[in-house]
Image: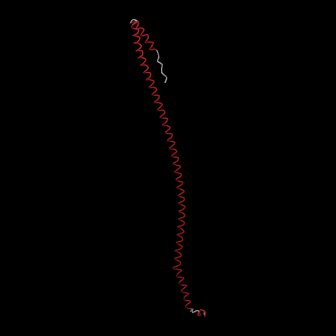
Amino acid sequence: MEMIEKFGLEAHLFLFQVINFLIIIGLLTKFLYKPIKSMLDERKKKIDQSLLDADNAKIALENAGEERKKILNEAKKDADSLTASVKTQMQETKEKFTESAKLSSQAIIEEAKQKAAVEFESLNKQIGKMSIDISGKIISKVFSDLFSEEDKQKLLSLALSKVEKVEYEKIPN
């Protein structure tokens, strides 16, 4: 103790200062250190949870990006198949309309040919009748000076009957 007194320390004051120091450490520990420590621990937990949530969000975003790509690829495939289907249907419809138009035009042409043939026959008959009439008039004029009326009628009817029996040749198409 002498040594303590040489330094100018009093033992009972030193003891009270040590006790005061320990009381202050105890109070600071209880009322300051522990609340700050618990607050820091809680804050660390929140930060760790936020980092974990951020990682999860990043993973979810990547998955969403992959899902988006997958959906877009499926949509593109569906659109491509639909486009191909529509093109096929359009081609089939085009072919049907083309075939229908060909058949319709062939039917119109055939009908026109038949009408032309009927008209040709009709005109041919009219021309034949006209030629018979003209032939009869020519024969009548020629025979009027050469034969009697009765002979002229016989020859005329004989000639006309032979002309009527002659078939007219059809002109090839």
In front here: 135 or 86?
135
Q: Position of residue 13 (x, y in %)?
A: 55, 91
Q: Is residue 69 above or below residue 129?
A: below
Left or right: residue 80 versus residue 142 is right
Give the left or right position of residue 110, taking residue 1 as reference. left
In the image, residue 104 sits, relative to residue 17, either above or below, namely above
The quarter of the rendered structure image containing the N terminus is bottom right
What is the number of callouts on the image? 0
* Residue 43 in the image, given as x and y percentages of width and height: 52, 72
In the rendered image, residue 112, in percent from the top left (x then y), is placed at 45, 28
- Between 103 and 33, the one lying in front of the other is 103
Protein image colouring: secondary structure
Quadrant for residue 11, please give it.
bottom right
Q: Examine the rendered structure and indicate whether residue 110 appears above or below residue 10.
A: above
Q: Is residue 15 left or right of residue 136?
A: right
Relative to 146, 53 lies left or right? right
Q: Position of residue 75 (x, y in %)?
A: 51, 51
Q: Closer to the camera, 173 or 4? A: 173
